Image: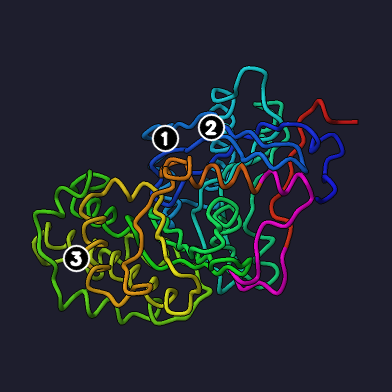
Amino acid sequence: MGDPLISSYPINEYRTVLGLISGTSADGVDVACVRFAPVGVNDPLELMSFQTIPYPAELKQRVLDASEDKLTLRQTAVLHTDLGRFFGEVAKEAMPEGGCHLVASHGQTVCHLPAQQTTLQLGEGAFIARETGVLTVTDFRPADLALGGQGAPLVPLFDRYLLAHQERSRIAVNLGGIANITVIPADSDKITAWDTGPANCVSDAVCRAHQKGDFDPEGRMAAEGKVDQTLLERLLQLDYFQTPPPKSTGLEDFGKEFALLYFQDRDFCDLLRTAVALSAQSLVNAIEHAANDLPGSSLDLVFAGGGTSNLTLMSEIRQRLASSRISRNGQRPGFLTFADFGISEEAREAVAFAYLGDRTARGLTGALPSTTGASRSAILGKISVPAPYYR
């Protein structure tokens, strides 16, 4: 059950939590309003609303510049404050009638260096708490890193909560800027998770590098190209794809520098198609690795994330799955989405951080050693208390 870290947090009542996240693609802020049942009541959580608020163009550019080491220390510090103000405004606008009990903000990742136990998510929680007047949890990753973990992925506990089944093993697949999976064996609490590599971030970076916009809508330009098989095979031999899990990655590995190094001097659409193929094949390789030892008579793949709207990426994944060795009792895996479980594909991560924020406020751990490689589980995040709570 856990003892709440804040004595006034109403664990024995229905609680409303706003979950916020901006992914590595920096498209904007996803905000989910989630209702949790009282502790001891087995009602499932309820997604009350979800929306995505795009970044203002100037703010988005500063986020991208920070990720590419183009900002000074002082400029990054100011961005941290400005993002906190912006997240606070977004949360305030998304507040349901009657208010909410907690805001849980993942923030904006601009640096993730797990080998050096370092990560940086911008968006100061004190400004969110001031703007909303609501208890706020932010900065979820460092507690896991301090215990030797990767600090990512952090959504597996939520995936297990939503998808666990006694007879069917399931693999949750998130396609954001980075792709990650959560492996949930049938009738078991033992889960594993890791980042498989890029999802959209390489194709996004290729678009920007060639001045073709910030991304490829629905993968339409990639659909016009052909896979450069020689380049794809070369990229799949890179160290990250050969490293066993647990592992995590980010734009440091698969951002602008990666695109400029490997995705030049070829037809633009061919480059995009090859970037999509890299995302798809590295994901399928990871699923194949995970599926071999899973129990149960059936296996489901459950997809989420903005990458599901990239039709070329989804087509590449389906084709490569069909030619893989992944099966269960001679049957191919089921192909589902989080929408089949009541959570839209786009909302999954925002809902997951609402779930993690609620766990933090309840004094419960938010990550598992089996998913991040940490020496033990930790309570995640830092709490910012608004003025009405002060004594």
Query: Picture coordinates of residue 372 (x, y %)?
Result: 59, 69
Q: CA distance from mark 1 to mark 2?
A: 9 Å
Residue 370 lies within the magenta run: yes
Numbered tag placed on residue 55 in the rendering:
1
Query: Where is mark 3, residue-wise?
Result: 274
State if disc 3 and disc 2 touch (CB < 8 Å): no
Numbered tag placed on residue 86 in the rendering:
2
Sooner in the amino-acid sequence: mark 2 or mark 3: 2
Task: Decide if residue 15 is on the left or right side of residue 24.
Answer: right
Residue toward you, 19 or 297: 297
Q: Residues within 10 Å of mark 2 (few under 14, many from 20)?
A: many
Q: Which amino acid is tagged 2?
A: Phe
Which quadrant would residue 378 be assigned to in this image? bottom right
Mark 2, secondary structure of its residue: helix
Q: Residues within 10 Å of mark 1 (few under 14, many from 20)?
A: some
Q: How has the structure been colored for display?
A: rainbow
User: Residue at (15%, 75%) from the top-left corner?
Assistant: 229
Query: Picture coordinates of residue 321 (x, y %)?
Result: 27, 68
Query: Picture coordinates of residue 375 (x, y %)?
Result: 70, 74
State if disc 2 and disc 1 touch (CB < 8 Å): yes
The span picked out in magenta is 357-377
Q: Which amino acid is tagged 1?
A: Tyr
